[in-house]
Image (cartoon, rainbow, N blue to C red):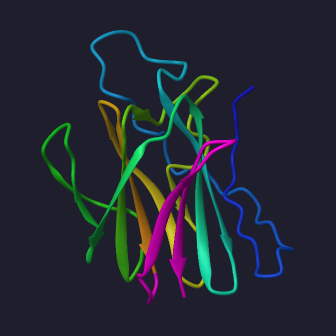
Amino acid sequence: MPKTSIIRQVSAAGAAVAAALVLAGPAPAQASTTSPVTSCPNICVLDARAGAHPDFDRLVFDLSGTGLPQVRATASADGTYHTAGDDEIRHLQISGKSYLLLDVSGGAVALPSGPDAYATPRVQSVSLPSLKGVELAAGYEGNVTFGLALGDHSQYKIFTLTSPNRVVVDVYH
């Protein structure tokens, strides 16, 4: 049975959970010269979920595997990003007024299938005050890039949590 996913949009009161959105396309496969990886070799990004709080929107990436990744954020005014694998400049598919690119590294992967597959749709819109969408943009040799579409505000905080392992992004209103 295939794994399905939703990004949850929670109101400030925490009452509403949005229905699953249609998968916009398959997650990109990791570059490999051998057979495809179907279990987590180090750190796998499993899904992304978002919720609204009184002063910020929170995006959480759930992880499996061992350890925590390094996360680096870069602002992009127009949603363009540079791919390491094929040395091209690409554009995010999600719409926003500004963008934040997250490079999750340290052996991180977003698998297209298997028990540790990335289950959230590759391109996902959300309707929160500051966070407008998230996109799995690229994956290459232990690095995964996500694009976040933002509204009017772009102040943010990124941190990791354990038990279970997660990457958290707070985008302030």
Q: Is residue 88 above or below residue 17?
A: above
Q: Is residue 57 above or below residue 5?
A: below
Viewer can see residue 127: no
Confirm whether the magenta stretch covers residue 104.
no
- State left or right for residue 132 relative to residue 92: right
Q: Nearer the viewer, residue 12 or 133?
A: 12
Whole-percent x, y for residue 76 in the image: 27, 71
Whole-percent x, y for residue 60 in the image: 60, 57
Q: Nearer the viewer, residue 156 or 35?
A: 156
Number of marks in the image? 0
Confirm whether the magenta stretch covers residue 157.
yes
Q: Residue furthest left?
A: 87
Q: Residue furthest right?
A: 15
- State left or right for residue 74 relative to residue 147: left
Whole-percent x, y for residue 43 in the image: 49, 32
Q: Which residues are magenta?
A: 151-173
Whole-percent x, y for residue 122 in the image: 50, 49
Q: Nearer the viewer, residue 60 or 111?
A: 60
Residue at left 69%, top 46%? 5
Q: Residue furthest top?
A: 34
Viewer can see residue 73: yes
Quarter of the picture holding the N terminus = top right
Residue at left 54%, top 88%? 173
Q: Picture quarter containing residue 141?
A: top left
Residue at left 43%, top 71%? 149
Q: Is residue 151 above or below residue 167?
A: below
Residue at left 77%, top 61%? 19
